[in-house]
Amino acid sequence: MAEQQTPEQKARAKARAKVARKLEGGVPSLRGTLIKIAFLALADAGALFASMLLIAQHQWLYFSVLLGATLLINWIYLRRGNLPAKYLAPGVILLICFQISIVFFSGFIAFTNYGALHNGSKEDAITSIKLSAIVTDTNAPFLYVSPVEDSNKNLEFLATDTTDAANPIIYLGGTDWAKQPWHQLSAAELANIKMGPSPADGTVIALSIKGFKTLTQDQVIARQAELSSLKVPLGANVDKAGFMALDPSATGVQRTFYDAIYDPKADTFTRQSDGKVFYADESIGFFDAKKGDLHSERISDTGWRVNIGLGNFNRIFGDKSLQKPLLGIFSWTIVFALTSVVSTFVVGLALAFLFNDDRIRGKKVYRSIMILPYAFPAFLSAYVWKGMFNTNAGFINTSILNLHKGHMIPWLTDPTWAKFAILLCNLWLGFPYMFLITTGALQAIPSELTESAMIDGATNWQQFRLIKLPLLLISLAPLLISSFAFNFNNFTVIYLITGGGPSGDPSLRVDAGGTDILISFVYKIAFSTGVGADYGLASAFSVLIFFIVGGISFFSFRRTQFLEDLA
Amino acid sequence: MTTLNELEPTDRVIKQRRMSPLKWARTLGWKHLVGIVVSLYALFPILYILSTSLTKAGSVSSGVLFSDFFLGNYTALFDPAKQHDRPFTRWVINTVVIASINAVASVFISALAAYAFSRMRFIGRRGGLMTLILIQMFPSILGLVAIYGILSEITKYFPPLGLGSLGGLIMIYLGGSLGGGTYLMYGFFNTVPKELDEAAKIDGATHTQIYFKIILRLVAPILAVQALLSFIGTVSDYILPSVVFNKPEQYTLALGLQFFIDQPYSQNWAMFCAGAVITATPVVALFMFLQRFITSGLTGGAVKG
Amino acid sequence: MKILKRTAALAAVAVAATALLAVSVPAQAATSTVTIWGDQNTHDAVFPALSKWAKTNKITVNYVVKDFGQLRAQSITAIPTGSGPDIIAGAHDWTGKLLGAGVIAPVSLGANAKNFSKEALSGFSVYGKLYGVPAWTENIALVYNKNKVSKPAATTAEWKKAIADGTVEVGFNATNGDPYHFAALDTSFGLSQYKRLNGAWTSQIGEGGANGAKFADWLAAADGGKALNSGNSGDWDTLNGQLQDPNSKVAYWITGPWAISALESDHAYGKPAVKTTALKPSEIGVTVFPSVGGSAVHQFSGVRGYWESVKVPGSAKALVVGKVLNALAGSDIQTAVYKLKQLIPANQVSVAKVTDPILLGFGKAGKAAYPMASFVFQDTTWSTLGKAEAAIISGNTQGKTPADFWQAAIDTLQSTIDNS
């Protein structure tokens, strides 16, 4: 750890900086310049490629952002001097695009009701409701169909009702009720019909009619977008009479009708059966009967994403059913993070002291074994611990502790044992790191310090307590703070071992498990339990968690020497 | 103790030989005892995985480790006939490719930044470094929705960096690389005397020459360690790949392995563990190989291991 | 001036290099490719027959294997962005959430409609509209080892004794419970997950009241719920092994057809490990549930099936996707799936071809089964009831009597549902 700077050093540093600015960069070599150009060209090529795609799709906003960024990068690297920008640009650009943007996006979602029932845009919701409003009349007969095309390239359905196989009834009609009305074929028209086996299952149906061209299977596939949404009205008022629509396999048509109709001008849905009107409610993101009333009837549970201001935050701080479990979870999060840091640090420190002794034979072997847990991918370890903790079949109960049925330790199913199990596993995962860093820190303590203490007659314990430990804590404080922040959000361990369980009081409205830390609890809100995913609430939580962890870390860092080092 | 530490090696050996058994037990013997106990604690879950991977039934049900020695799980993983459904070989390749690209690129990017923070003085330097440390504390698991949203937006306009692309995943990783490595590297860069730069400057070296030819060579150990840590981090990540990738042949090992245990009634722990051993072996080997440098890498040169 | 010149030269070189490196726009996805997202088991059951069919119809089916637990959530996030599947394969009780998220479109079965039972269709319907194509059905029944039980329990008294003697096992998780399997028990007390009206579920929880209290007391009783042999999901070996082991008293297992293939292979369980050998199909009995509480048993039936993405109708691959769905509904593929994986088809034409006595046993037991509800809040109901059951069995009722604890859980559940 660098020592405090004296005024002379500071002055020298200032002078040095001045010289550096003058000399900044030196005279570029040809090779360096060529490499630089090559890299810049590569980046520009990528940008050019992307901008062509953006222009092709008329995305002018994204295009101008890209253009600006590209120009900025070229400016940074082509002009002389301004070295910090040259060294920082790649990282900072990526940081802004893929990290800070994520933080901001989450912050944005926190003010919306994005979640299970508010999953997409309003257009998506309307599309979905409109599709759901199209009802196939399952009481109507299923008619085999041959899609045909008249001389003007208008599509019509040539359909055969084979309910009475001996006397098939044949219909024809197109989308325009006035010009090509749906009708049963007259005797005269029937003379123009050619019957044959249906390509789907061989039933004998009308395959073609004079004056029309029957579509081949390939043409059906080629025009599927058009065919699948083709509606052949059954009367002048299609809303009342319904229409014929193709079934998904394109083998037949069946009577279909709207049970709700969307009016784009009024932005309402009207239910056909009772004439009830449902309004687009922008405050809660549903089509409902009474605007602003969450409990009024909706045309559908499918809603859309709307901005709800501080709604999510109000729920976090105002919802009584959240308060009690949250308090418990928050305190366990702190306990978990602190205990994890302290336990791993104490074990790591003790081991570092014990094995900082060259007389021990096989020291290297011990060290190599002890850091294994750190090298092993953590998610794999978590799975293994979970398996070993299994009450009835786990290796710990059955083999290590050699317990018998009825006396098994409920490692993962009892809240207290589960907490202990989690901490035991996290100790395993974390102590090697602490062992490594404390070993390093110990070896960095100048031997003069301990020697002079020896001369002063200090015991080993006094040396440790009064000299080594404070020095260690000073140099390792930033790492311990980071470790706390890491464990505060240590999702992997909790999620993979207990999933936050065992579950708490089922009479609570939220699923607050015995080992749930804030992050795993919020994950459940976001992705699984309850009445469905609630990304908005989860994002609000994640913003708060960020402020909590960031705040704790920031103030802790300020208390360490960290910031002085940055002078 | 301290004095003993400072004896010459030859003296130490002599001392040790002369030690009476009782004294040995008191001074060193108990340390061996502790060492063995801790080693068992550290080793046990790993031996358990290894043992399970060698069982036919999928669990060490006999209660004794290594009572089976069945290699079938390993051969089954690479069995060409099963690659269509579970392209394990592809997963290995994908993991190595993604983790390597990410390790090299993220070290490159954060080393550049660390150099700037260590050697240059500019406005926002303090705040910048602090921001970097704090920004990585954002709970990324909760950023998944945002990550998905951003990537799917990119997919619409520029597929090579969007969902289902290697590029998209690597970009997300690299976005976090500044926060992950810069601070530790910064500390290490500070331990390289600035006089070296200045001497080179006076000799007419450019800033890139100083950086690439002098500084980077001196901090090579930390570069290796940071690359290793980034490599381990990528290999261990099962969350982001599951957001970005759609096709099994794109999966990484961490994601693919879950296939063996995701069906509630047909979990294949033996195959999972065999896959886990294959996943972990190169990582552990690299770790052991670079062990010498790791301490300094982790403490950012604040202390030297 | 000099610097400016150099900068200009550099810029020129950069632009030239850029132009050289520029690449063409990627090609559009083919309209005859249909993407399905589903889990591994569905893939293994359906893909062989489906891909054969697709080949003859010149359609490419791109089946993406997903983790079953994440499949639904991933579909919900992916479909609105346009990067989701065309068809989702899953369990029918997802329908409510998928529809709530606005990611699925109604389907019509066309000529196949007449071949599906009302129960199978109701599982995929919301407010009377059909949203999914049923693939195969699953329900639990009483599975027993014929070597240990010659005549299975049939009356309430016989069944109660079998449970009290510790001969019955059920694979519930001690934390989260398993209300799906426990439906074989709680419904016999006259309970139902929701109250039923005109053969359909209402949103009123039907587990409370006096009957609920009786059930809760039975769960907590030493010769009742506590006497059930449980196992965590990791205990698959134990559940199979106990039933196979001639020396274990476990003779009955409350489980479904998915357990059969495991019963027909060897296991090792317990400590010290007991190796048990596979049962022959003729040694496995499947029968209807006797009643513990005296009322009729209505376990759940689950239907697996397929939904169509909301992005498909009116799109350039609407009919191709429709054809695939139609083929999946048809008896050719459903019969092939039955033959390959012994799954009870939903298409009645295929059902007629089932001859396996074990499957017929499940089919018989399933006559009384109700399809699981698919409300948006369904997950909450599962988890609340399951956790409450698990807590009562483990005696972890937080100082309340089992009956009070059970009723409290139901009251909160009901209020959660009412406020959603």
Image (tube, helix red, strand yellow):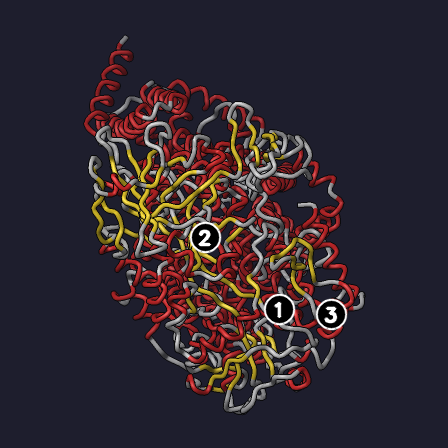
Crowding near pointer 2: few (<14 within 10 Å), some, many (20+)?
Answer: many
State whether residue A13 appears in this view: yes
Task: Let me know if marks 3 and 1 both belong to one chain.
Answer: yes
* Amino acid type, residue under disc 3 in the picture: Ala
Query: Residue A75 location in percent, x, y?
Result: 35, 19
Label 2: state its secondary structure: strand
Location of residue A535 (image quadrant): top right
Mark pair 2, 3: CA separation: 36 Å
Identify the residue under disc 1. C183
Q: Is residue B30 above or below residue B116?
A: below
Query: Label 3, on which residue?
Result: C216
- Disc 2 target residue: C132
Label 3 and label 1: CA atoms lie apart by 13 Å
Dot 3: what SS? helix
Residue at horizontal 73%, vertical 68%? C396
What chain does mark 1 sit on? C
